[in-house]
């Protein structure tokens, strides 16, 4: 059984291990102890803050495997990106070139540097231990954030987005970076990715070309990876797409990985979530699984268990009481998994 809860300082060694395992391309989760410690501190401060509208708060969560009490995953939410500096992306759009005299009308795809997602909530930093990359763990870790957003809508924007890792190999070779970014910096993709993770992408964007990049002028291998998921991120992307996220022609400025977005009110987990009382039955026998959330902010927690909704609440096995630190009558959230 898995449990998702807010991260705390004793979790730092486990987060370092996950960051090293994540490898290259998870820009906002660098294998840097100081940066990870700062992420925990920022999350704890955000959970203790009285928020009336979203700002630069961030929330970091960990997933615990209950039998071994081992941290096997992490994920986070940024309440609003681009607060201190613009959040840059490439927007894919067409440029029209026409000559009435020659009767030629061409639409050429181009990349426009923009910060359209500044001021928007972002899902980020989802990393799961290789030994626990099963469908249940991925679904719980990814969707737990959506229950947190549904429980605290005032802390987030009505639109949210997620950047999906783009194509690069285990050595850090990115066809898109080599074709574009490498020409403006004296560093490889691995170093640029790391520097962005421990600071922000602003210093990169300052040196990127401000004019549109015509896609056909890029090498074919770079064109082929624009908007393409990294194989290791495909399962997570599919979960979000199933929730209702869509691709709106925005890509990352480093590896051209796709950015997907959604309205909170349209997400399956949010629209299907219910609130009510926790009910327990020692003879409970049911086979439908539900995401179950309890707690408010610093004590928020999510697990998955067999359960059955009733008018009075959600009926579960007694075992969930200890896992979730709840009792009969506790207020909980649930959504079918």
Image: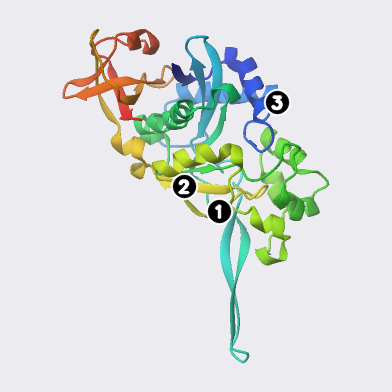
Q: Position of residue 236 (x, y in %)?
A: 51, 37
Q: Secondary structure at mark 2?
A: strand
Report crowding for label 3: few under 14, some 14 to 19, many 20 or more residues within 10 A (C-alpha): some
Q: Which label belongs to residue 242?
A: none
Residue identifier under label 2 = 261
Residue at 74% in and 51% down: 181
Lower position in the chain sequence, tag 1 or tag 2: 1
Q: Is residue 161 visible?
A: yes
* In contact (CB < 8 Å): disc 2 and disc 3: no
Q: Position of residue 45 (x, y in %)?
A: 52, 23
- Residue farthest to the left? 311
Q: Secondary structure at mark 3?
A: loop
Residue at 26% in and 26% down: 275
Tell me: 31 left or right of 146. right
Q: Position of residue 109 (x, y in %)?
A: 60, 66
Q: Nearer the viewer, residue 109 or 212?
A: 109
Tell me: 114 left or right of 204. left
Residue at 73% in and 60% down: 219
The N terminus: image quadrant:
top left
| Quarter holding residue 41 | top right
Q: Is residue 52 visible?
A: no
Residue identifier under label 1 = 250
Residue 166, relative to residue 42: is it above or below? Answer: below
| Quarter holding residue 200 | top right
* In contact (CB < 8 Å): disc 1 and disc 2: yes
- Residue farthest to the right? 186
Q: CA distance from mark 1 to mark 2?
A: 10 Å
The C terminus: image quadrant:
top left
């Amino acid at each position: 059984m898995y449990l998702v809860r807010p991260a705390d300082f004793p979790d730092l060694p486990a987060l370092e291990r996950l960051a090293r395992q994540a490898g290259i391309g998870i820009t906002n989760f660098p294998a840097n102890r100081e940066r990870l410690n700062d992420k925990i501190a920022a999350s704890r401060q955000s959970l203790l803050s009285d928020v009336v509208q979203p700002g630069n708060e961030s929330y970091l969560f960990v997933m615990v495997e209950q039998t071994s009490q081992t941290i096997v995953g992490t994920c986070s939410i940024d309440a609003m990106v681009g607060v201190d500096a613009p959040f840059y992306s490439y927007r894919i759009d067409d440029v029209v070139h026409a000559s009435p005299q020659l009767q030629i009308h061409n639409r050429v795809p181009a990349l426009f540097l923009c910060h359209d997602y500044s001021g928007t909530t972002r899902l980020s930093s989802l990393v799961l231990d290789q030994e626990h990359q099963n469908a249940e763990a991925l679904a719980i870790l990814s969707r737990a954030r959506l229950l947190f957003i549904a429980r605290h809508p005032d802390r987030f924007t009505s639109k949210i987005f997620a950047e999906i890792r783009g194509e690069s190999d285990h050595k850090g070779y990115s066809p898109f970076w080599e074709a574009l970014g490498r020409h403006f910096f004296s560093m490889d993709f691995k170093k640029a990715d790391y520097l962005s993770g421990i600071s922000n992408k602003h210093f990169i964007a300052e040196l990127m070309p401000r004019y549109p990049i015509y896609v056909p002028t890029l090498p074919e291998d770079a064109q082929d990876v624009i908007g393409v998921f990294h194989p290791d991120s495909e399962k997570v992307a599919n979960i979000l797409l199933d929730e209702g996220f869509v691709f709106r022609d925005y890509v990352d400025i480093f590896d051209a990985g796709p950015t997907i977005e959604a309205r909170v009110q349209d997400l399956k987990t949010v629209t299907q979530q219910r609130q009510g009382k926790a009910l327990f039955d020692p003879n409970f026998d049911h086979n439908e699984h539900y995401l179950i959330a309890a707690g408010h902010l610093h004590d928020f927690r999510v697990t998955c268990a067999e359960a059955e909704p009733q008018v009075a609440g959600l009926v579960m096995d007694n075992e969930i009481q200890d896992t979730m630190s709840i009792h009969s009558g506790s207020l909980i959230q649930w959504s079918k998994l």
